[in-house]
Amino acid sequence: MQSNEPGNAERTQPADPARDGLQTPCLLLDAAKVRANVDRMRAHLTGLGVAFRPHLKTAKSLDVARIAMTAPEGPAMVSTLREAEYFAEGGVRDMIYGVGIAPAKLDRVAAIRARGVDLAVILDSLEQADAVAAQARAAGDALPVLIEVDADGHRSGVAPDDTATLVAIGRRLTEGGAALRGVLLHAGDSYALSDPAALADAAEAERRAAVRAADALRGAGLPCPVVSIGSTPTARFARDLTGVTEVRAGVFMFGDLYQAGTGAVAVADIALSVLATVIGHQRAKGWIIVDAGWMALSRDRGTAKQAVDQGYGVVCDLAGQAYPDLLVADANQEHGIVALRRGSGARLPDLPVGSRIRILPNHACATGAQHECYHVLDEAGRVSGVWPRINGW
Amino acid sequence: MQSNEPGNAERTQPADPARDGLQTPCLLLDAAKVRANVDRMRAHLTGLGVAFRPHLKTAKSLDVARIAMTAPEGPAMVSTLREAEYFAEGGVRDMIYGVGIAPAKLDRVAAIRARGVDLAVILDSLEQADAVAAQARAAGDALPVLIEVDADGHRSGVAPDDTATLVAIGRRLTEGGAALRGVLLHAGDSYALSDPAALADAAEAERRAAVRAADALRGAGLPCPVVSIGSTPTARFARDLTGVTEVRAGVFMFGDLYQAGTGAVAVADIALSVLATVIGHQRAKGWIIVDAGWMALSRDRGTAKQAVDQGYGVVCDLAGQAYPDLLVADANQEHGIVALRRGSGARLPDLPVGSRIRILPNHACATGAQHECYHVLDEAGRVSGVWPRINGW
């Protein structure tokens, strides 16, 4: 784009000694944007009459969880048992572990539940149901289970019209001593969409599959109190969620360039960025070298498949305003190569060695995981604190 | 490939209660393979008459460093100041920090040097030289510097024929109170090659550029005791290193599918793998779902650009033997989708829920960074201990 945005001279770079003292690369998190993103999602889901179970896999931070959750005890969704342990330690009492349960993980699940946490698991096979039922009997604890249902062929789950398998799993669980809590779906293929109408259709397809599976269980006399669906794009574009009891979503809290490419968030709402320092130039090539490579940004190149390829990230000034057409065009482990988008008529900004920039990520889940904490920006854009985060399993 | 490899029935899966007790996903590291990879590189470089400065950015582990280094004190190469601090704590005394120095990092460099560590920095501009010289004078410490020289247009560095800039930087450093220790190059473009002759040519080009830059400095009466080059492919394929004093390489210690694609390592020599558990199936699609997604494997898809695309990794049995044509075909955050290579005539192995597999990574640096430790395999293939590793900056 040829842009009317201000050049370097006019850019207001907010003074902030705390930020200037940070060692780069590191994560900045705009807390006000997180709160606004959460408020928007909550209002949308409240309007649709469903509960909200925030997915904590993106943030992996108790501070962020407390903004996202409707109560300090949850509900919440986690992607690893380490998250479950960490959030349990922080007082969260209602969680679903959202990866099909491996039998060898049931001891850890039992230990978390023994601390008074209502941790549920998901599964999509009779073998898993048998293992869970055996664990429930051994522990004397009716472990709650949601049957994973395949919304759109994305990865796991029983087909929503496979009533025989759904009912067989449900019976194995309830007769074996576990508790059948409901069905859970994730419309993962929605991430490949960008048209609002197509996304609304994907949300409706996810809803229909969920209701169909729930009806199949109930029709066989089995309980199905929870009908859980979720993905940031379908959560955002759902118009009617009749029959659904709760929606899960996570990445929307931070937003990222990929979600912006789907239309689920606005670039201006992206709360996460990587602070980096200019360490050199290759002026003949129009390159600015910065100290954020793929180790700090992640290897995620999700936008390469979208209409607008954002390289390894969009480059912004310290106020968070994007420089016209300036991207991290390539990345080595600890080096980012900043350059104008190919074919752009924009002017390369003058950023001497030691200048600092902020980089908006392709994928907040992946970029966040490369770091150990968030440096939190307050309403004035100043670094006001540190929020730790976890990684690992 | 249509293969004569043994099917499941004939596969010997070594019994190992320690391994079976591991929570997945996690890293396995074959210590004997690391030692053999290091021995091979050392012998090659000894034959070429150059010192070896192992790059510790892949392993980020003191246990691995002690295998790789020629002495407990080093020399070694690091990619972050956190690595420098960690290895200094572990007794390493000779390090180069291999990312162009940002002025705001010089206080940390000084603190490490104040502990008696000979930590050198690299740079490629007069601005950086001035900042380093100012720091050297302020600290009363002749901070050693290598001028980064651009071997092949890959990223940073002064052009090897830009004598004026090389000499100007050298003079600013020496006259300003810093110590000019030499020149440093990295033939990063060699990673895109796979032909041994082309790789030998790349190594020779790297050597020639290094010698040319060193001669330029010496011709101006400046010191250049160290002539440092390095990359795993050029280190492996170099035939003559006249004029070079040391070679750096790191990823070769572990090897990975990308390096195997360049010919720099053999698949059988890859020491790093991710242990994962089968958590489900989509039989109609030929999918096996495992609990290692991109969070455990990294988003690196480097082999997508090579002659053989290995997806998110090659799937092996517990003995480390690859199943014919079996790949992690796709990955979500905590899910891997295992499937046969497209068009393969091989048979999908029978891997029930709870079965365990090992996944060879595309890129050892990226996969390693997703984890906090290595579970170490002994000569018999049994898990014999844990080696911690670090991440962050």
Image: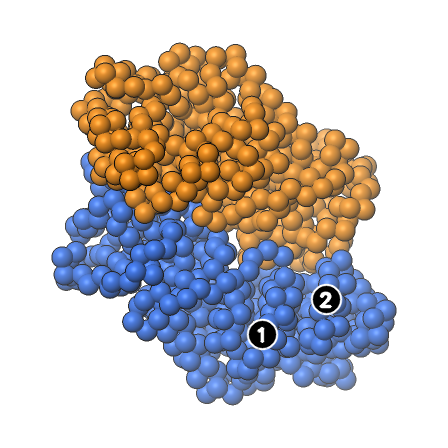
Chain colours: A blue, B orange
Q: Residue at x 23, y 16 (%)?
A: B221
Q: Looking at the picture, does residue A187 appear above or below residue B75?
A: below
- Chain letter of mark 2 equals A
Query: Quadrant of residue B132 in the image?
Result: top left
- Residue A134's spot in the image, x, y percent? 84, 67
Can the viewer see residue B279 in this picture? yes
Q: Residue at x 47, y 60 (%)?
A: A373
Q: Foreground: A79 or A243?
A: A79
Q: CA distance from mark 2 to mark 1?
A: 15 Å
Report whether B161 appears left or right of A229: left
Quadrant in which the N terminus of chain B appears:
top right
Q: Residue at x 42, y 80 (%)?
A: A39
Q: Residue at x 70, y 63 (%)?
A: A101
Mark 1 crowd level (few <14, some 14–19, many ≥20, 10 Å Cα): many
Mark 1: amino acid = Ala
Pointer 2 residue: A109
Q: Foreground: A163 or B171?
A: B171
Query: Quadrant of residue A94 in the image?
Result: bottom right
Pointer 1 residue: A76
Q: Looking at the picture, does residue B279 appear above or below residue A46?
A: above
Assign a secondary structure to mark 1.
Answer: strand
Residue at far front of view? B140
- Residue B359's spot in the image, x, y percent? 63, 43
Q: Foreground: A22 or B195?
A: A22
Mark 2: amino acid = Val
- Chain letter of mark 1 equals A
Report whether A152 appears left or right of B224: right
Residue at far right of view? A138
Query: Quadrant of residue A128 in the image?
Result: bottom right
First-in-chain label (2 vs 1): 1
